[in-house]
Image (cartoon, rainbow, N blue to C red):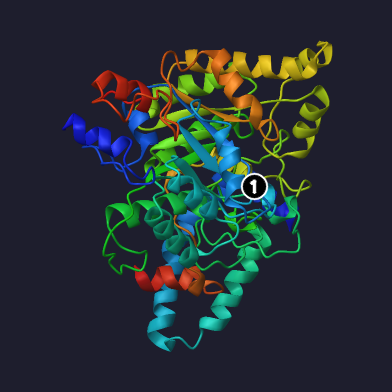
Amino acid sequence: MSDDLDFVEEFGVNPGDPLVQRPGHVSHGRFERVLRAGHFAVTTEIAPPDSVDPDEVLARAKLFDGYVDAINATDGSGANCHMSSLGVCAILTRAGYSPIIQFSCRDRNRIAMQGDLLGAAALGVCSVLCLTGDDVGAGDHPEAKPVFDLDSISLLQTTKILRDESRFLSGRPLDAAPRLFVGASINPFVPPLENRVDQLAKKIRAGAEFIQSQYCFDIDQLKRFMARACDMGLHEQAYILVGVGVLGSAKTAKWLRSNVPGVHIPDAIINRLEGARNQKAEGRRIAVELMQQIKETPGVAGAHLMAYRHEEWVGEIVKQSGVLGDRKPWAPEPLDSTIGVVTPLEEVVDSITGTDS
Amino acid sequence: MYAIRRWSSRHARGLERLYKATRPGILSGLRLVTRLFGKRLDRPITATERLLKGALFDCQMCGDCVLSKTGMTCPMNCPKGIRNGPCGGVRANGMCEVKPDMRCVWVDAWNGAAKMEDGDAIKDIEFAVDHSRVGQSSWLRLARDE
């Protein structure tokens, strides 16, 4: 591939211009490039605003510049109302970011879901995370009708059918198929523990190419899970990113554990927070250590750092953990001011885009 | 009823044997009925299925029965109607995230499947329910499709 052309693609006139789809890739997205190049990827989550101001989205995304490879846009997480993940992603792709759109089955039937998958791809979204979604009872509109026409696995299949067979579920052909890198979530930390690997295998068979897990605060449990996943060869069939949470205090940790379904926090973590003089700093230290331990766990391809209400800590945690090594993920403005002026060397481009394939 | 439904999951092995033994007879009977009466007996047959499976499994008559693949546990009792569960919200004690007093349907399903001869069928991917079939008899459909 021509280096000059590659350069224009990466830092073109309009940062929202699509990249070139590389051979063997299913999307033209940067996130897929990073993973397929074999890098340890870091993703995070953006809290969608309760607002129509696009600058608010961009200001929140800017906190992550240079530290993450992709940003998940949550879809009414916890069944609370916010700006849609599609809206957030459209704003992010225009600025050149690489968002992962979260698609929950709670609020839309299969007609709306397929339409929105096409819409997302048309707006430059390259990665989608297929979720079943929280129940409406968990959120601020418990009187809403839960849809759940599909479940996460049926949604994975649906996305694959749109992309690979270029047709709707009905069979009606598409004129142009969405090029989406397809992901799913797992939670290895809640019952039935012995079947969680089977569930992962099922999601991969349904089409998941990358996986983002629920918060991992229990490294031993993760190691047991990953050992079984590796035995089944699952780590070679999908890129597994493990979720890392940032706990602000022991009180928050206890609240999360008892009020948010699916969050498993061992007593050891809570005791450690309680015993710390500065609980906030300790929470960050725990996150840093988890990132490092996760990177050391065989079969893991990356970390998904979820710092709800502590987004400003993401950069520091990633930096301190050192999991990126010398690699600097792409950010909207060239980090080196000479880029874009001189003919770039391949390694300069690669160090900034984080992809040297 | 909840207690009976849970009993059925615990006794998935026995129910599987019963199902395998009676299935050919039930299906050929239904085929015979169809030949003799056409669709005139569909309503009483559907009502019988609803009554029987309702009592044993809290069957919701989704019209696409997968009981024999899901550890004799009806997935339609999952508040999210997940056909490929469980979700990630299961409580540490194995209870449902939405209904804390109810055992997660899919925890029971995987446990039931582990007892069954053909329990591995729970690993098959089931596509979401066809809503145009909800309320219809799965037995009749099986008899007429096969």
Query: Closer to the camera, A60 or B53?
Result: A60
Q: Which residue is mark 1?
A: A77
Give the side of residue B73 with respect to residue A129, left or right.
Answer: right
Q: Residue A30: where, in percent of width, then height? A: 37, 36
Please state, as top left, top right, bottom left or bottom right, where the N terminus of chain A lies in the image: top left
**Helix, strand or loop under label 1:** helix
Q: Is residue A165 visible?
A: yes
Please state, as top left, top right, bottom left or bottom right, where the C terminus of chain A lies in the image: top left
- Label 1 is found on which chain of the structure? A
Q: Residue A132: where, in percent of width, then height? A: 56, 50
Q: Label 1 crowding class (10 Å Cα cut-off): few <14, some 14-19, many 20+? A: some
Q: Residue A247: where, in percent of width, then height? A: 72, 25
Give the side of residue A265 with respect to residue B80, left or right.
Answer: right
Q: Identify the residue shown where x is 76% and y is 55%.
A: A140
A154, above or below A319, in the image: below
Q: Identify the residue shown where x is 30% and y is 25%.
A: A349
A301, above or below A176, in the image: above
A147, above or below A121, in the image: below
Give the side of residue A322 with respect to residue A26, left or right.
Answer: right
The quarter of the displayed image where residue A145 is located? bottom right
Q: Identify the residue shown where x is 55% and y is 31%.
A: A64
Residue at far left of view: A2
The quarter of the displayed image where residue A246 is located? top right
Q: Is residue A269 visible?
A: no
Query: Closer to the camera, A258 or A56?
Result: A56
Q: Residue A231: where, in percent of width, then height? A: 40, 21
Disc tally is 1
The quarter of the displayed image where residue A148 is located? bottom right
Query: Closer to the camera, A276 or A232?
Result: A276
Amino acid type shown at disc 1: Ser
A323, above or below B78, in the image: above
Q: Identify the residue shown where x is 46% and y is 67%.
A: A111
